[in-house]
């Protein structure tokens, strides 16, 4: 090596190119200036592009600046057989104690948490979304709570698409992605990856390796999202794959024991182990059960609810009925677009006026009925208009909203008069196709509360009641792992939790 390089880089003598690169790699970023890299490239007969790469390949990891290896320990299944009804009841009771959600959402959360331990037994993995109208509604607390219940939780406040699909393929974690309302829209590729991972064969294509070989990365893995106003912040395609939990700011008395992972985390970890054991013992059933979905729950809605319905069916008791109630009472998740709302309102018009518009309806009458049924929405449809009389929805706007459904205004006859309007049979067709369960009267639960008609539902006295029971704020639940002498092979969780939940 020349004296020129030694003097400039302040390096000891080296016998070959590899030794020189090793010595350069020991320099700090401040010492390894551009001029030194350029000088080294000249002396080593390398390009200024290749030299930094050659040096970097020999640099040791510099502490936290290089991050840390992602490690997700496997959840060890519980060492006793677990009763499914007792398990679900205990998880529901824990939710009632630490979170403020309505009973239907609570029951869906219970089954979703268990699903994360066996998601690969299903064709789909529904996304779980915690949302609220503003801050301090318990979304982040719910995420921390869930991180102790699900399988292989990976909690993050931000995530790149590359990190998502590589971790999904290599670790198959349960992603817990918080604050999505503030950053998710900045990267349009991540929602696509999340959507693709909804189904078992979902994935992304990327060029990888030195030869840029096209490789497929599986993104099929559970995902939990949290953020403010997800109904307006997430893409519709993502929302349609989500079981949405609408949260609201809780009053002090509505949360018996505010969640503290230092006090309550170990007990939830034990419930996760119990979930893993229950899944392990029912693996064959989980893969085979095909629950009957409630009327009207079809297409993607059925895809996202079917895994939870299957688990509820195997758990038995009144859990099939509880999930059916959750499905029937599901919030909108994403607010329907104006076209869907218009079709829905047209269906209600025909419900209220079954004889008046048997063959056709004038556009002027349609606007009148729209304002009668939902005055606030349709009377202010043009809320940016300067003149008040321009605010209600206009005939041309109705035509525009119905056009994607293949419906156009035409000259029609009603009660001997003619004018522009719509044929009833054409409107009935799109109502039947897009709103199969439309009815003015809210749907009622049938007497058959299970998903399978030939399976009786047994009412359990120890199932968590929908009316919350106030627990002691001092209850830390440390007795979850206690054992009783002479207990049966199946752990009775209700006895274990006696006096706590």
Image (spheres, rainbow, N blue to C red):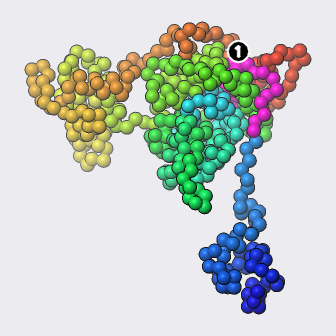
Q: Mark 1 points at which residue?
A: 462
Point out the image quarter for the C terminus.
Answer: top right
Is 77 part of what is drawn in magenta? yes
Would residue 487 be found to the left or right of residue 184 on screen? Answer: right
Whether residue 236 sits left or right of residue 180 in the image: it is left
* Image quarter (top left, top right, bottom left or bottom right) of the N terminus: bottom right
Q: Report the span colored magenta.
A: 74-99
Tell me, yes or no, if residue 17 can be seen here: yes
**Label 1 neighbour load within 10 Å: few <14, some 14-19, many 20+:** few
Q: Residue furthest right?
A: 485
Q: Work out whether residue 210 or residue 290 is closer to the camera in this orientation and state it.
A: 210
Q: Position of residue 377 (x, y in %)?
A: 34, 35
Residue 258 vs residue 300, the one in the foreground:
300
Residue 28 occupies quadrant: bottom right
* Place of residue 103 in the rendered image (x, y in percent of width and height, measured from the top left): 59, 24
Q: Decide which of 4, 463 is in the foreground and name it.
A: 4
Above or below for 293 versus 363? above
Asked if the stretch drawn in magenta spans residue 41, the answer is no
Q: Which residue lies furthest to the bottom in this view?
A: 3
Name the residue: 31% across, 39% down. 380
Q: Residue at x 27, y 47 (%)?
A: 385
Kindly indicate the quadrant of the structure image that contains residue 209: bottom right
User: In the figure, residue 399 lies in which quadrant?
Assistant: top left
Element assignment for label 1:
loop
Q: Residue 439: percent from the left, percent from the top?
A: 37, 19
């Amino acid at each position: 090596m020349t004296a020129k390089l030694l003097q400039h880089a302040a390096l000891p003598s080296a016998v070959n190119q590899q030794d020189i690169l090793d010595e350069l790699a020991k320099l700090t970023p401040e010492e390894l200036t551009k001029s030194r890299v350029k000088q080294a490239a000249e002396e080593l007969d390398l390009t200024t592009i290749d030299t930094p790469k050659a040096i970097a390949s020999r640099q040791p990891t510099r502490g936290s600046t290089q991050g840390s290896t992602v490690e997700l320990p496997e959840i060890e299944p519980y060492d006793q057989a677990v009763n499914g009804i007792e398990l679900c009841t205990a998880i529901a009771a824990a939710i009632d104690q630490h979170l403020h959600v309505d009973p239907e959402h609570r029951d869906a959360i219970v089954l979703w948490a268990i699903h994360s331990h066996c998601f690969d037994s299903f064709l789909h993995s529904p996304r779980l979304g915690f949302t609220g109208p503003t801050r301090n509604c318990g979304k982040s607390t719910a995420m921390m709570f869930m991180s102790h219940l699900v399988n292989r939780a990976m909690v993050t406040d931000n995530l790149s698409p590359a990190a998502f699909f590589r971790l999904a393929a290599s670790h198959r974690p349960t992603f817990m992605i918080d604050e999505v309302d503030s950053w998710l829209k900045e990267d349009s590729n991540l929602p696509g990856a999340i959507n693709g991972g909804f189904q078992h064969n979902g994935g992304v294509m990327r060029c990888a390796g030195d030869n840029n070989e096209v490789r497929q990365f599986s993104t099929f893995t559970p995902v939990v999202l949290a953020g403010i106003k997800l109904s307006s912040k997430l893409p519709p395609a993502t929302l349609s794959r989500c079981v949405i939990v609408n949260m609201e700011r809780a009053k002090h008395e509505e949360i018996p024991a505010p969640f503290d992972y230092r006090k309550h985390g170990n007990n939830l970890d034990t419930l996760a182990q119990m979930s893993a054991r229950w899944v392990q013992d029912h693996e064959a059933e989980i893969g085979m059960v095909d629950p009957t979905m409630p009327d009207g729950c079809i297409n993607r809605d059925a895809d996202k609810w079917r895994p939870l319905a299957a688990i509820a069916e195997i758990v038995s008791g009144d859990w099939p009925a509880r999930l059916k109630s959750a499905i029937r009472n599901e919030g909108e998740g994403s607010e329907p677009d104006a076209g869907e709302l218009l079709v829905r309102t047209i269906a209600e018009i025909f419900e209220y006026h079954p004889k008046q518009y048997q063959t056709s309806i004038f556009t002027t009458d349609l606007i009148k009925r729209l304002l009668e049924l939902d005055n606030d929405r349709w009377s202010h449809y043009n809320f940016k208009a300067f003149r008040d009389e321009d605010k209600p929805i206009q005939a041309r706007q109705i035509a525009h909203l119905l056009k994607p459904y293949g419906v156009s205004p035409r000259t029609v006859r009603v009660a001997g008069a003619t004018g522009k309007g719509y044929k009833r049979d054409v409107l009935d067709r799109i109502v039947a196709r897009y709103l199969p369960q439309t009815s003015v009267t809210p749907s009622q639960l049938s007497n058959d509360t299970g998903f399978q008609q030939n399976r009786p539902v047994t009412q359990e006295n120890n199932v968590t009641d929908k009316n919350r029971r106030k627990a002691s704020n001092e209850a830390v639940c440390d007795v979850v792992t206690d054992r009783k002498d002479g207990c049966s092979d199946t752990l009775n969780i209700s006895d274990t939790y006696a006096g706590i939940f």
